[in-house]
Amino acid sequence: NYFCLSIFTQNLTLPSSQFAKIFPLYPGWPMNLLIIDDNKADIVLIQKMLEKIGDDSLSFESASSFTEGLNYIKNIKFDLVLLDLGLPESKGAETLGNMSKLLAEQAVIVLTGLSDEQIGIDAIKMGAQDFLCKETITAVLLKKSIRYAIERHKLIQEKKQLLKTLQDAVKNIQTLEGIIPICMVCKKIRDDKGYWEQVEQYVSRYTPAQFTHGICPHCKDKFTAEEETNES
């Protein structure tokens, strides 16, 4: 079994094992995949494709039911799950409903039949990264889909983390609204319990703002004049 790659005007012909080492599935990243499919023939076919397109850093496990797949995920960290929608415990839409249990930690590619293409599209809408039809899947298509799925999942996780960071920041930001009673002479503020306190104390309590103290030119002139009067 050989792969032929055309580079400009030269042809490079390599055994599949050498091809995989030069053009690895995901360079520099040991990858762990899980196949959830009750059809042993399909599992063998996918495993052979993975062996063609992967390198020594690629490893994979297989499960014949959704429950078995979840048990694997509880004990092993997977980068990607290849999920067949026609499982003994659930089929089609029911499997899609269970799919949310897989989406938090790893990318998911849904495997469908040609007649289930709409379900594959629905799977993407529900959070899967891609779907492949078993009847038309090839090693090249599988490799492209895996790379796309992992990158897309990575971007989604980064967006979720960014959103969480922003939400946490919003929770930490406190604002002052409404009418604030302030003394026209000493400029102290009355809080909601009826106590009077310095402006900086009040603001610091309700916002993350910090104060640094100085003296304005008007107060400086006034203070200097009072000092001179006291000295005379």
Image (tube, grey):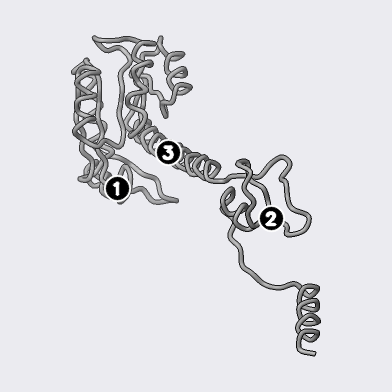
Q: Nearer the viewer, residue 232 or 128?
A: 232
Mark 3, secondary structure of its residue: helix
Disc sitting over residue 29 in the figure: 1
> For the residues marked 2 and 1, what is the alpha-carbon distance in whole angstroms?
62 Å
In the rendered image, which residue does mark 3 sit on? 157
Give the residue type that dot 3 points to.
Gln
Q: Earlier in the sequence, mark 1 or mark 3?
A: 1
Q: Residue at x 45, y 21 (%)?
A: 126
- Count all numbered tags in the image, as a single digit: 3
Q: Please, is residue 192 above or below residue 9 in the view?
A: above
The residue beneath circle 2 is: 188
Near-viewer residue (222 or 45): 222
Disc 3 to disc 2, how far (Cα)? 48 Å
Residue type at mark 2? Answer: Lys
Foreground label between 1 and 3: 3
N-terminal label among 2 and 1: 1
Q: Looking at the image, is 217 positioned above or below residue 209?
A: below
The amino acid type, in three-letter code, at marker 1 is Trp
Q: Position of residue 132 (x, y in %)?
A: 38, 23
